[in-house]
Image (spheres, rainbow, N blue to C red):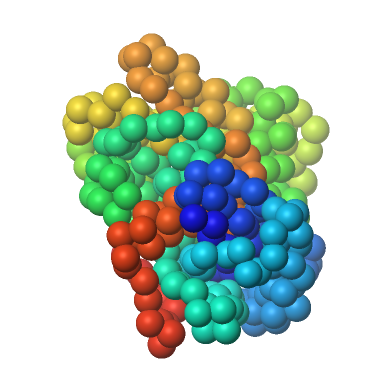
């Protein structure tokens, strides 16, 4: 089955053509990062307007790259939520319009469901597995028993890890989104230079907290005389990243052990982080665990990731009516 997938939950407009929920024929991503960078974060109103401008072009490119016409598409899958409501509605409205015009079945997928199934586009990962969804809006641990069968084991009680990366980057005068810049700076620094806290690390639950870590960095920055630069900047980035990575890895490994799961999937934008990849592979390797990170393009927001669940639902005869609404918040 050939599916057209559409994602517009935040600041990336994306469309993909995927065969049988596994083979990616195209995955076009138009980023709005430049538009939002000057404001230091995503401006929802601007995001919606930029999606309106980009969406038809992105869909045309996805079809062209896949070398198919719209008449070959057999179903439409779209992000229903969670995300910025105006942004979601752009993708959803276009998805509905195509479904209506071409008389195609339509299915709405949860954004995080897309992220945690993304590795299946690249390799066989058998169920059950533990999934860490770690992005700008989420830091959630799930037990994944199959497509549509998720058990939430723990989540952040305040900021998401990506949000903390971006806010710390902003404190250091780096442009939005700063996660990747912290990652680059960290590679030249000493992760033990500054002992930042590891909130909730020693509590038995599987929840996370990144707000206190961010405040600790802010307090540290305020205490310095003059701007932080040179080696000092590298050490700070490395120390902060080490604290985030430490908490993410320890809680993930604890969850896998408690659940008796030997496979771990890490997905979402922060799964691009080189420190997290290296450390979890090392720690998981010691325990004989099977660790999967999607390649960076499938970690960040993209439409192809939606097709794994979308294909499964449409084959099972699950589709949505055309009055389907978007959901800004939607638990998975
Ligand atoms: O999944 P995603 O593209 O969008 C959301 O659904 O939020 O994730 C974006 C987040 C941003 O906070 C960004 O700074 C972070 O992922 N990110 C990183 C890295 N690359 C992206 N954080 C740390 N290290 C990276 N290399
Ligand atoms: Zn995302």
The residue at 64%/44% (across/down) is 297
Residue 320 coordinates in the image, percent (x, y): 37, 76
| Left or right: 144, with 274 as reference point | left
In this view of the protein, can residue 54 be seen by the observer? yes
**Viewer-proximal residue, 324 or 225?**
324
The mark total stands at 0
Residue 111 in the image: above or below residue 243:
below
Q: Where, by quadrant of the figure, is residue 277 drawn?
A: top right
**Viewer-proximal residue, 157 or 145?**
145
**Viewer-proximal residue, 102 or 323?**
102
If the image is split into quadrants, where does the C terminus sit?
bottom left
Q: Residue furthest front?
A: 71
| Left or right: 110, with 64 as reference point | left
The residue at 39%/22% (across/down) is 290
Residue 83 in the image: above or below residue 280:
below
Residue 20 in the image: above or below residue 103:
above
The residue at 30%/36% (across/down) is 127
In this view of the protein, can residue 41 be seen by the observer? no
Residue 237 coordinates in the image, percent (x, y): 64, 36
Residue 49 in the image: above or below residue 253:
below
Residue 64 coordinates in the image, percent (x, y): 76, 59
């Amino acid at each position: 089955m050939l599916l057209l997938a559409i994602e517009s939950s935040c600041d990336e407009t994306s469309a993909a053509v995927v065969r049988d929920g596994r083979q990616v024929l195209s995955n076009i991503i138009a980023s709005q990062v430049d538009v939002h960078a000057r404001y230091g974060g995503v401006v929802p109103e601007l995001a919606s307007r930029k999606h309106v401008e980009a969406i038809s072009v992105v869909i045309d490119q996805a079809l062209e790259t896949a070398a198919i016409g719209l008449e070959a598409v057999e179903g439409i899958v779209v992000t229903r939520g969670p995300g910025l409501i105006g942004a979601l509605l752009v993708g959803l409205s276009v998805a509905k319009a195509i479904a209506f015009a071409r008389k195609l079945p339509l299915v709405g997928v949860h954004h995080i469901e897309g992220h945690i199934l993304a590795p299946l586009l690249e390799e066989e990962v058998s169920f059950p597995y533990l999934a860490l969804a770690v992005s700008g809006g989420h830091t959630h641990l799930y037990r994944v028993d199959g497509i549509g069968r998720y058990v939430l084991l723990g989540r952040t009680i305040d900021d998401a890890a990506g949000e903390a990366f971006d806010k710390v980057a902003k404190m250091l005068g780096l442009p939005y989104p700063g996660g990747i810049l912290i990652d680059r700076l960290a590679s030249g620094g000493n992760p033990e230079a500054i002992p930042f806290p590891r909130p909730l690390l020693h509590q038995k639950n599987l929840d996370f907290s990144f707000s206190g870590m961010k405040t600790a960095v802010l307090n540290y920055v305020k205490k310095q005389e003059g701007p932080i630069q040179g080696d000092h900047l590298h050490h700070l980035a490395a120390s902060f990243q080490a604290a985030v990575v430490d908490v993410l890895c320890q809680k993930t490994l604890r969850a896998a052990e408690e659940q008796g799961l030997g496979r771990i999937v890490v997905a979402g934008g922060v799964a691009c982080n080189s420190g997290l990849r290296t450390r979890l592979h090392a720690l998981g390797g010691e325990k004989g665990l099977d660790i999967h990170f999607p390649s960076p393009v499938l970690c960040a927001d993209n439409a192809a990731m939606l097709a794994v669940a979308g294909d499964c639902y449409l084959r099972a005869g699950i589709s949505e009516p055309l009055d389907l609404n978007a959901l800004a918040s939607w638990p998975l």
